[in-house]
Amino acid sequence: MALTSSPLKFAALGAVLALGLTGCKDAQTAAPAAQEVPEISFLIMEPQSRPIVRELPGRTAPTRIAEVRARVSGIVIERAFLQGSEVKAGDVLYRIDPKPFEVELQLQEAAMAKAAAMLEQAHQQAKRIETLFQGKSASQAQLEQAVSANRQAEADFQARTADVQRARLNLEYATVRSPINGRVGGALVTEGALVGQNEATHLTTVQQLDPIYADFTQSITELSQLRRDLERGDIEQVAPETAKVRLVLDDGSIYIHPGKLLFSGAQVEPSTGKVTLRGEFPNPKQELLPGMYVRVQLEQGIDSDAIAVPSQAIQRNFSGNSEVYVIRDDNVVIAQPVRVGGIIEGQRLITEGLKKGDRVVVEGFQKITAGIKVTPIPWTQPATANPAQRADVAPVVIR
């Protein structure tokens, strides 16, 4: 029995030794992998001078609105414009039946001619009485009566002249013209309608859209903070001739034409705590229409030492606060809490937590945790540029 069991014992011992040797070999191959230092991409923080731009909600509005109304009463005989078309100041929009006004003008001209004849007669009579008075052939009372009659004739002639001017004006008002350049709206009356009867009938509306306004609001809290930052010297004042106002359209694109800030309201809206501002923008192609929702980028200052990181460098901790991974001089990664601001050309403004020379991790987060050693590699920005990174776009946007 002992002799037959020996081979089995030796076989079992061999299997155990083989498993042991295999385990040792696996442990030896796994050890270098566990000691491998991950490579991550980093960016060195360099403060730069950047304009600070507030991005505020707003709506477009026409620069001028003219409600075209009937100034005389009558029947509309013609609509002379194409609805929604561009018109110039003085273009004919409607024609009201002019015949009653032509008759009235003729009547007043006849009355004026009669008054002119009466004036001439009174003038001659006054001259004759004056000559007779000088020759002692007319009394003082006759002279005064002749002079008074002459003055009455002059006044009557002036009244008739005014009646003629009024009749001509009414005849001119029968042709309704556009008071401004702009785009005419829909026709509110049609041919055959009686207008101007006891009221100035609204016929249509003309809106000037080039240039166009953008009305937007900013909280008084932000404005007050801006003033304090300027007073402390944290940011620099933007020169009025260099400040830019830009529009961000609803699809996220930047409107090609920059504008100018016209005014900042002097009154705070009690219900919202905001101040109204207005910008003016060129609109040569009529791309902007009244009532469009836009976001207005308003340049309000210059941060002389702004620090920004790519958006993907911002991480969130368990508390929901922002942090970044910073590489120390010994290449050990640490989590650094930061306070973030607005967007800077596709990057995030860091208001607190970073300083010049800090190495911030940009790529490779899946390979690291705080406290491990890494192999830093300088980060190369992707070649595909974000539209917001164009040079003509205001760089620091605070929403």
Image: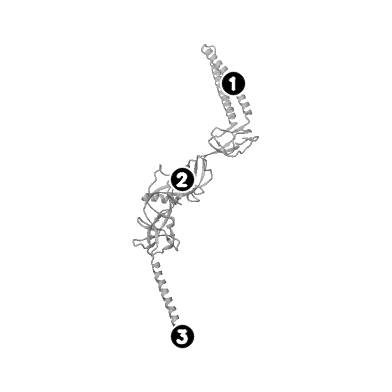
Q: Badge 2 is on which residue?
A: 246
Taking the image as drawn, is residue 377 in sight?
yes
Q: How is the image coloured?
A: one colour
Which mark lies nearer to you, 2 or 1? 2
- Measuring 42% from the left and 76% from the top, which residue is drawn there? 20
In the foreground, 355 or 163: 355
Q: Badge 1 is on which residue?
A: 113
Callout 3: few (<14), some (14-19), or many (20+) C-alpha neighbours within 10 Å?
few
For badge 1, the amino acid type reads Ala
Counting from the top left corner in percent of width and height, residue 44 is at 37, 55
Counting from the top left corner in percent of width and height, residue 306 is at 38, 52
Q: In which quarter of the image is residue 189?
A: top right
Q: Are marks 1 and 3 in contact (CB under 8 Å)?
A: no
In the rendered image, the residue lying farthest to the left is 329
* Marking on residue 175: none
Q: Please tell me whether residue 272 is drawn above or below residue 189 in the rendered image.
A: below
- Lateral position of residue 359 relative to residue 254, left or right: left
Which mark lies nearer to you, 1 or 3? 3
For badge 2, the amino acid type reads Arg
Q: Please tell me whether residue 198 is drawn above or below residue 145 in the rendered image.
A: below
Callout 2: few (<14), some (14-19), or many (20+) C-alpha neighbours within 10 Å?
many
Q: Badge 3 is on which residue?
A: 5
First of labels 2, 1 by sequence position: 1
Q: Please tell me whether residue 376 is drawn above or below residue 194 in the rendered image.
A: below
Counting from the top left corner in percent of width and height, residue 292 is at 53, 46
In the foreground, 193 or 35: 35
Q: How far apart are marks 2 and 3 (CA)?
A: 93 Å
In the foreground, 191 or 28: 28
Q: What element carries label 3?
A: helix
